[in-house]
Amino acid sequence: MNVVRDMLKAGKTAIGSTASLASPAELLADAGFDFLLFDTQHSAVEIKELQHQLKAMRGKKAIPIVRVGDNYQDQICYALDIGAKGIIVPMVNSKEEAAHMVRCCKYPPEGIRSAAGMRGEWGKFEDFNEYMSAVNEDLLIIPMIETMKALKNLEEIVSVPGIDVLLVGPSDLSIALGIALDYHNPKYHETLDRIAGACKDAGVIPGMYFIPGGLDPSEFVERGFKFFTRPWSQWATAGIKDGLATIKR
């Protein structure tokens, strides 16, 4: 139902890439990534505009995950209704905000999501109650930690039932710590280790929106961060060059 959630539960690392309206989503979804992350917080795109991109991913290896602009019920509903299998909400700063996010993601009785019929990306169901239960169980729910207030409330946030991944916003977190974009600063890594520890205690997976340049993704995996994105364009360019290099011309 949700391969990324199954991977994370099995202790494996899920690696995705960011995508946009201009990205070749159908190609990328079968290129080896586990998920594609569509951002509507910092991108000049409305959630509903992503419908064709998400539809093109059906039946492919990677699942679509959407970052909404804020912790609003309507934005989360839009993203789910067009086929998102994971929801990211930025700037979640308290237990109450995390709980609200979870409620917006889930159908009753666990949440307050409005029903708009069965969505084919979750499979076929004869019974609507069975469908709602399956979606409630398999949807990836991913709040972001990016502020000092969130760090203060870290343990309470990860204690909220239903959270699968706590996602670090690398840039905003560094700014909040007073070390803007200084990703090598010991203070930054001490904070990441604290986040990873709290997540481990709560049974939540710590993740990174991206791995900052100059840092080794494998080291992050060793520290427990098993959900992150990597840029696809450089890899694609390298692959094309390697392919052309095999031709004698």
Image (spheres, grey):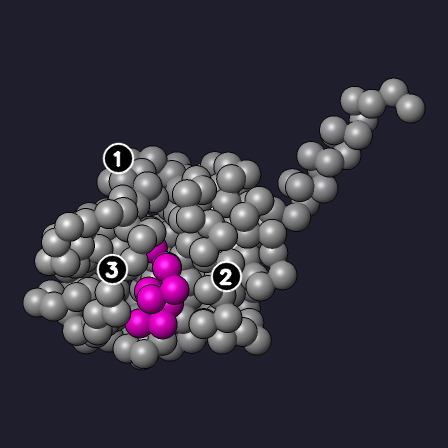
Query: Residues in magenta?
Result: 77-85
Q: Are marks 1 and 2 in contact (CB under 8 Å)?
A: no
Q: Is residue 174 toward the left or the right of residue 145 in the image?
A: right
Q: Which residue is mark 2?
A: 52
Badge 1, how many Cα within 10 Å: few under 14, some, many 20+?
A: few
- In the picture as drawn, the residue positioned furthest to the right comes out as 249
Q: Nearer the viewer, residue 222 or 243?
A: 243
- In the picture as drawn, the residue positioned furthest to the front comes out as 126
**Of labels 1 and 2, the one closer to you:** 2
- Identify the residue at image location x=27%, y=47%: 123
SS at badge 3 = loop
Q: Is residue 183 toward the left or the right of residue 86 in the image?
A: right
Please state the total of marks drawn on the protein image: 3
Residue 129 visible (yes or no): yes
In the picture, the disc for residue 10 is: 1
Separation (CA) of disc 1 from disc 2: 31 Å
| Quadrant in which the C terminus appears | top right
The percent coordinates of residue 210 (x first, y second) are 50, 54
Identity of the amino acid at label 3? Met
Q: Which residue is mark 3?
A: 118
Separation (CA) of disc 2 from disc 3: 18 Å
Q: Quadrant of residue 112?
A: bottom left
